[in-house]
Image (cartoon, grey):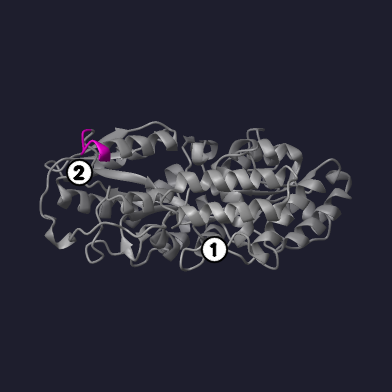
Amino acid sequence: MATTNKAQRVAFAGLSVIAVLATAACGGGDKATSGESTAALNWDQKGPITFVQGKDNNNLVQPLLNEWNKEHPNEKVTFVQLSASADEQRQKMVDNANTKGASNFDVLYLDIVWTAEFAAKQWVHELPKDMFPTDGMLQPAVDGATYFDKLYAYPTSSDGAMLYFRKDLLEKAGIKEAPKTWSDMKAACTKVKALPEGKGLDCYGGQFQKYEGLTCNITEIVNSSGAEFLDKDGKPQVNSEAALKGVQWLQDSFKDGTIPKAATTWMEEPSRQAFQDGKLVFLRQWPYIYSLMQAKDGSSKVADKFGIAPLPGLEGPGVSTLGGHNLAISKTAKNLGTARDFIKWYGEEAQQKTAAQKATLAPTRESLYADADLVKQLPYLPVLKESIATAKARPKVVAYNDATQAIQDASANVIAGKDPKSNFEGLQTKLTELTK
């Protein structure tokens, strides 16, 4: 994710996990004002450090830190656990920067969407690429940790949305594969709803409540229509003809019932519940829901009845919003050598595999998507890799909080039936101001 108050990852029953999901993506926009020379920093200084992230209900972090601390008794890492709210996590990190390290925060677990802001405002150190190699990592994840061609964080987990579909019903309707376009999806729904088993089902669901999840969904719709929020030069393009085709599709889908009106109240969990209760044919969602829907304890009506595919788009496969988290070094950190070594260790294949097994965190290490044991446990990994490989970040704007609010306002108006063109021309103006 998505995404917390910016998207939340919740109970992962199959692995007895309750985790906080953040499906945010990378920010960016204004040029970095940092003029620091990484060569002038003392990367040899070692000693105790702190590791700061949101609530760890899945008990992933402390066991990993115990492993590190056992091997590095003079460089112990202390876990500083913040709240489950992404907004509150960010604010605590901002407070630490503004008070020149009063909270003693060293290594920060940054939601990918915060990268640009923290880099541009000089709250984190640039990471020398020769010290922090990213070979073998998924390129979109590396891009999400990069700001103006400089690495400011180390990619440790990624995420991508996928299309969950009722494979059993599509097969009964004579449909052999998941749809690749929105029109194919609507046609499939018509056939499924004509079946006795399809009576009363809704077609498609996503996360359309006015919160960060709506930004994820509308970004995907715009990108999947062949458009983009910002071009390669960082200039907004949300009022382009292609973008408006995607936005119009969203409005039309609510009007004709393809997307149920109830979806305007859906975040991650209500949408997951609707599909899991057998009320939807298709659902746009993150991978964390897989084992919940495969539960054999009677809580899921779709266990062994669904499939997973890449998102559909206007004229072909769609584009997911990029999610994930990166590790960054606070500008107030002192023991940079330990911070560097710990971050690299935390991002190694072994630790990422543990994170995938215990918390369903998508690896940034490409090799893990072919790991036989991991694929057996998480069979959606090949589709997820495809989703992440083509994923795009949300609009790269340093003032991301303002940008996402503007995106949500315009999108909610369109869903409510207001004119797409005028609303997205207004959004174009707002984003232009924010990206100057």
Residue 259 place in picture, x, y as percent? 75, 46
* Label total for image: 2
Residue 312 place in picture, x, y as percent? 67, 60
Tell me the crowding category of disc 2: few under 14, some 14 to 19, or many 20 or more residues within 10 angstroms, Cα based. many
Residue stretch in magenta: 97-102
| Residue located beneath label 2 in the image | 332
Helix, strand or loop at label 2? It is loop
Tell me the crowding category of disc 1: few under 14, some 14 to 19, or many 20 or more residues within 10 angstroms, Cα based. some
Which residue is painted at 54% across and 39% down in the image? 14
N-term-proximal mark, 2 vs 1: 2
Q: Are marks 2 and 1 in contact (CB under 8 Å)?
A: no
On whether residue 101 falls in the magenta region, the answer is yes
Residue type at mark 2: give it. Answer: Thr
Depth check, front residue: 376 or 367: 367
Depth check, front residue: 122 or 356: 122
Which residue is painted at 73% across and 37% down in the image? 262
Mark sitting on residue 386? 1
Which residue is painted at 76% across and 42% down in the image? 260
In the picture, residue 72 is in which quadrant? Answer: top left
Residue 285 place in picture, x, y as percent? 60, 48
Residue 106 place in picture, x, y as percent? 23, 42
Does the rendering let one see residue 227?
yes
Location of the C terminus by quadrant is bottom left
Depth check, front residue: 215 or 275: 215
